[in-house]
Image: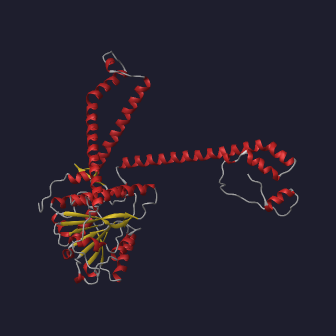
Amino acid sequence: MAPWTGLWGARAGAGAGAYRGTPVVVKMENPNWSISEISPEDAEDEDFLVSGAGAARRRKGGRGKNAKQITWVLLLKAHRAAGCLASLASAAVTLGAAARRRVADGRTDADAGATPGSAGESPVLRSRFYAFIRAFLLLSLLLLAVELAARFHGWDLAASALALPIIGVESLYASWLRLRAAYLAPLLQFLTDACVVLFLIQSADRLIQCLGSFYITVKRIKPRLKSPALPDAEDPDAGYYPMVLVQIPMCNEKEVYQQSIAAVCNLDWPRSNFLVQVLDDSDDPTTQSLIREEVAKWQQTGARILYRHRVLRDGYKAGNLKSAMACSYVKDYEFVAIFDADFQPNPDFLKRTVPHFKDNDELGLVQARWSFVNKDENLLTRLQNINLCFHFEVEQQVNGVFLNFFGFNGTAGVWRIKALEESGGWMERTTVEDMDIAVRAHLHGWKFIFLNDVEVFANVNCQSHTRLTGSSNIGGIPVQCSYSGFAYRTSSSPRKGG
């Protein structure tokens, strides 16, 4: 370390008694240094501050002082390590308790806030299903314990040794080995081979989709407007401005309802040609009153917006949309745009989507992509953004260009009301109502368009996985299933009006 100069160097050279006065104490919080930064060279360089016997005493007692510092630093690090281990243990115990409680109750996070009268699967069937899961888990743990005990006792019973006389516990273990080799092993091998085949099919599907996306990018293929709407939205007769119904289904959306309602009410479209339905399924009276007041505020500004609340909240989101489409005034509208409560469309959304329906009577759906405002918040949001970007950029775009069919994302889309009616409308039989209506519309011959350049802003949240997976009912038992592009393309051939 270089010697000090200037005022402090002069004071040091003059000795400790040259300057007197009130001492100044400097306190450092969280000093940014470690024990590895203290070197003997630095200590020797600082000896010029103390002369004579003081320097000798410092050099003589330096070893003990450094040892004490090392001891305290090691104790501090040990304390931090113990705290980290305690936090991990507490988190593991909490996670285990939560899993045990959910399995015992047969309820999930989605069911925790549901009312007793809401529609859903039979509690008896759900309890039986979770009882089967618990029994299977306990059986698996028991068999694992048997294998560990056999390994610990050295029971390595090969096939050649099974013919020898075996008695006691080893006889039971040998019987288990024969049963496993004769019945369980072939079944597990078949399931493994089936999973490998499915993995290869999905890998080939992803490869084909990536090649299709590359072709679309190179050729710059995208849907073109045949007759774009004129920029003057205040004159409905000057361009193509059909009647549009905008729906915002929500349930206890206390944090985002204001942004969503404001974004929809500010759409650049003739106010006489679109109506906003706020479909509130909230069971919290406070949230209901807040949303109702927000709707009343926009009504005073001249926006055509209605508040609708169901007393019997059957069918979840599908039931909410089905109930709204049953209103008598819906017959006056030709298209319906759907936005979830956490989505905020740009003012030109309808101008960039609805004109695709003009002179295209076979078009049933125009889907826009999602754009996330908090995608860089943390690692989880970045990973979800990558996953969903692949879904829109590759899967949806390739299926839309080459097949005119893809899965409706449940929001940020415009439907032709005639297509919904011919397909049977929203059905409450499943919680993946977006995929259900898309498949039925495709089977009736309706075509879809995906607009990759039209973005609707939203937030990535912890429930985003529900937009990619949903539950189906097989024999009354809820089963989680995921829909991929391969499943879309293996659907039955479309038949108009079938």
Residue 242 % position (x, y)? 22, 77
Q: Quick one: which residue is furthest to the left in this view?
A: 498
Quarter of the picture containing the C terminus is bottom left
Residue appearing at x 26%, y 84% in the figure:
235
- Residue at 38% over, 77% down: 293
* Colour convention of the picture: secondary structure
The image quarter containing residue 12 is: bottom right
Q: Position of residue 426 (x, y in %)?
A: 22, 63
Which of the pair 219/83 is nearer the observer? 219
Q: How many marks?
A: 0
Q: Is residue 255 left or right of residue 478?
A: right
Residue closest to the eye, 188 or 457 = 457
Residue 110 visible? no
Whether residue 74 can be seen here? yes
Vertical relation: 295 (above or below) 439: below
- In the displayed structure image, the side of residue 122 where residue 146 appears, left or right: right
Q: Residue at x 32, y 26 (%)?
A: 177
Residue 487 x/y as whole percent: 23, 51
Judge from the rendering whether residue 162 lies leftward or rightward of residue 38; answer left or right: left
Task: Measuring from the top left, give residue 300's x and y in whole percent.
Answer: 35, 83
Q: Name the outermost residue toward the front.
A: 218
Classify residue 362 by image quadrant. Answer: bottom left
**Which picture quadrant has residue 198?**
top left
Of residues 214 and 477, the one nearer the viewer is: 214
